[in-house]
Image: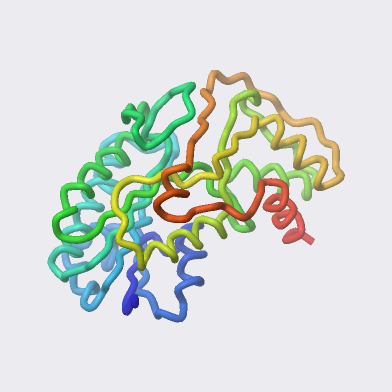
Amino acid sequence: MVEKILITGANGFIGTALSEKFRAYDPILLNKGDGKDGILDPNMYKLFKGVDVVIHLAALGNYSGAKLEDFMKVNVDGTVNVLEAAKITGVKKFIFASTGLVYGNSKLRLTEEHPLNPVHPYEQSKAAAEAKCLLYGGFFDVMIFRFSNVYGNKGVKSVVYKFLHNLANGQPSRVVGGKQKRDFVHIDDVTGLISKCTGKTATGAFNVCSGKSYTVNYIYEMAEKISGIKLEPERVASSDYSYEFSNSKAQKLLGFYPRTDLKSGMEMIWESFK
């Protein structure tokens, strides 16, 4: 039985939902900053006393304004600091939030056996952090979750949320490319899996995805259909690749079968605007 859980990145989209789910356990909540109690705080380990499970979500997010060294400082050095704190205090399980983007550009349906080939600084830092996590596998169980696009009612950064939000407010959306495919997994399925895995002994990397991919154009058309609003978007050319993932390993070893299909998830977001 889990006695104590520590969540980093607790104020993010996934972290907020997870904190609520684990509220009965009175989890310890940390954010990503380098100030007191942040993941770069050298004295952070003092907060880990009695912790059984660390769920490490804190990261510098994927945006173009940051440099490689910024990503490496927070996403790699910060992760090592969290790993060291977990090692010192005898944590039993470490769950690390990574991204499916670590595979790089590929037209294949990606499984965990696909070699990592990260292209941009964000995913390069995530791949490096994954490697650091695996080095600590002798001290506690390490699970790496490579998320596809996580969406839901409060996921304001998701294109799914943005399309619906803009339609609700009569604002045109920006559709970049449109033909590229993306995999979307609902926040409830993500938090449900993490909750289940706090008590599992499985280790290694897992794709956390729906296993189904849709074009960005399809997502926008679905948003119009659900909202009942037609609004021509601003279209921007793009050479973005499609990303399609397999979740067969998570199904087999973790019993992960996402329950929320994309249409239902989008309808829930739309209802939250009313």
- Quarter of the picture containing the N terminus is bottom left
Decide which of 103, 204 is in the foreground and name it. Answer: 204
- Which residue: 56% across, 44% down? 210
**Position in image of residue 121 (x %, y %):** 34, 33
Q: State left or right for residue 60 relative to residue 240.
A: left
Above or below, 187 against 167 in this view is below
Above or below, 174 against 10 in this view is above
Above or below, 7 against 131 in this view is below
Decide which of 200, 241 is in the foreground and name it. Answer: 200
Question: Which image quadrant is residue 139 in?
Answer: bottom left
Q: How is the image coloured?
A: rainbow
Q: State left or right for residue 47 relative to residue 259.
A: left
- Which residue: 19% across, 73% down? 46
**In the image, farthest residue toward the front:** 252
Label tally: 0
Question: Which image quadrant is residue 35 in?
Answer: bottom left
**Position in image of residue 7 (x %, y %):** 36, 65
**Position in image of residue 169 (x %, y %):** 77, 49
Decide which of 31, 14 is in the foreground and name it. Answer: 14
**Position in image of residue 192 (x %, y %):** 50, 62
- Quarter of the picture containing the C terminus is bottom right
Decide which of 115, 47 is in the foreground and name it. Answer: 115
- Which residue: 26% across, 74% down? 51
- Which residue: 23% across, 67% down? 92
